[in-house]
Image (spheres, rainbow, N blue to C red):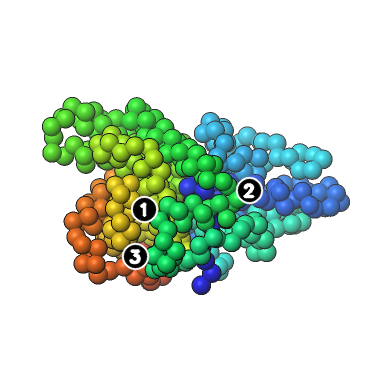
Amino acid sequence: MDPIDTSIFELFKIGPGPSSSHTIGPMVAGGEFIKAVQDLGPELLARASRVQVRLFGSLSATGEGHGTDRAVMAGLLGQTPETCPPEFLDGLADKDAAHNLSLPGREIALRAQDVIFDSVEHDFPFNNTLVIGLLDPDGKALFERQYYSIGGGFIHWEGRIPPKRGAPAHPYATMRGLEKIIIERGLSLNQVMLDNETAISGLPRPKIVSGLRRMIRVMDQAVARGLKADGVLPGPLGLARKAKAMFAHYRSCPQSRGRLMLALDACAFAVAEENASGHTVVTAPTCGSAGVIPACLYVMRRIMDLPEENLVNGMLAAAAVGLIVKRNASVAGAEVGCQGEIGVAAAMAAAMLAQAAGKPLKIVENAAETALEHHLGMTCDPVAGYVQIPCIERNAMGAVKAYNAMLIACSEAGNQHLVGLDQVIRAMAATGRDMSDKYKETALGGLGVSMVNC
Ligand code: SF4
């Protein structure tokens, strides 16, 4: 099996919510299409009349609630996920407005009706598929490309030449492989992750550490914004924001036995509500599950009293788990259900908590395994296609499970734990393959149906 050569900063990405595969990925696809168009000859470009985007699979089923139309338009108009202001996306909500799309040497109009919510059922190789075309005045495609949004904001397309990257210094593809390297080469988990990141992305260690600090800062900012915000979330559900009241409850009962859980709940809600509002979050591993790790970071800093250095170390362990899952299964709700989003976020957070507390590698692995094991089979069934119900509460439940998984792992001897992380990842992948498409971010099953039909 090829070693993992994905950068930590492809896993942790800054971007607008509410769904990395429905917002960040399509925005990147829009930008990539405009880059590809630059290479077309002037004759072809002179005949271009408009750009058309067709959304398939869960991008069609739940794309409207997820803001996929606005995200892909923003990408076509030159925005990138990391810097796109939420107001820019809000400005694309006007269905009648024409926006200037820049082609080499000229501009054409881009309108909301140029984005079509096409069939949910299709034969493309990936569930979340976009077909973007440059059309002549008769609607004939002058240039067309299929893009696949494969989860966590990652995009593929046929003929894509992957960006040049170095080979990892310590090659591994599984948890067993990582453990073998750590033992045989006498390294720590942090050393392996840092050496590999330098080899893969070319970043020196101080830049990797400052990059991780930046991710923590953006996560903290999302917590802080969400804890202050009032009102109702966008969309037809009329769901009230709850993080602020939850946090007030947490602060008003310093002696409460549920204090730690209240802190996790309030912070996870805060980020998940920010995400549902289309505001900036960090994929961890996705936007839908972006509240789990920040909630645990808050507790690590404010309740466990851990210094920043330990938080950075914890983030490296979280990245190790996320990258192993991504290589051997998936982190996309549209591919494997919510076990791949909230389940993986909880596994990453559990590993982070154990690593930051200075626990040995086996305990770090066991914490991650326990957290993921108890999300196996969890479906993705967002009501009305909005990343709100059940997603927001699921972030809080994921954070609490992560903390509990860390406690369980720290309370048993490492070798008493019989299930390995690789085994549970294989189980998750197989469960995801068997799962009906109704439960993969299409809003056609589970709560997505029972709540709407009652
Ligand atoms: S149910 Fe889970 S996987 Fe599906 S959109 Fe919500 S958070 Fe993401």
Residue placed most toward the observer, 173 or 390: 173
Label located before the other in sequence (2 or 3): 2
Q: Secondary structure at mark 2?
A: helix
- Residue at mark 1: 348
Q: Secondary structure at mark 1?
A: helix
Using a 10 Å C-alpha cutoff, classify the residue at mark 3 as few (fewer than 14 neighbours), some (14 to 19) or many (20 or more): many
The answer to whether residue 106 is above or below residue 361 is above
Query: How far across and how far down the image is residue 210, in percent?
Result: 50, 39
Residue displayed at 52% across by 48% down: 9
Q: Amino acid at mark 3?
A: Leu
- Residue at mark 3: 421
Residue displayed at 29% across by 47% down: 357
Q: Amino acid at mark 1?
A: Met
Query: Can residue 162 be seen at all in this image of the molecule?
Result: yes
- Residue at mark 2: 30
Q: Which mark is residue 339?
A: none
In this rendering, the label closer to the viewer, 2 or 3: 3
Q: How many marks?
A: 3
Label located before the other in sequence (3 or 1): 1
Query: How far across and how far down the image is residue 162, in percent?
Result: 64, 59
Using a 10 Å C-alpha cutoff, classify the residue at mark 1 as few (fewer than 14 neighbours), some (14 to 19) or many (20 or more): many
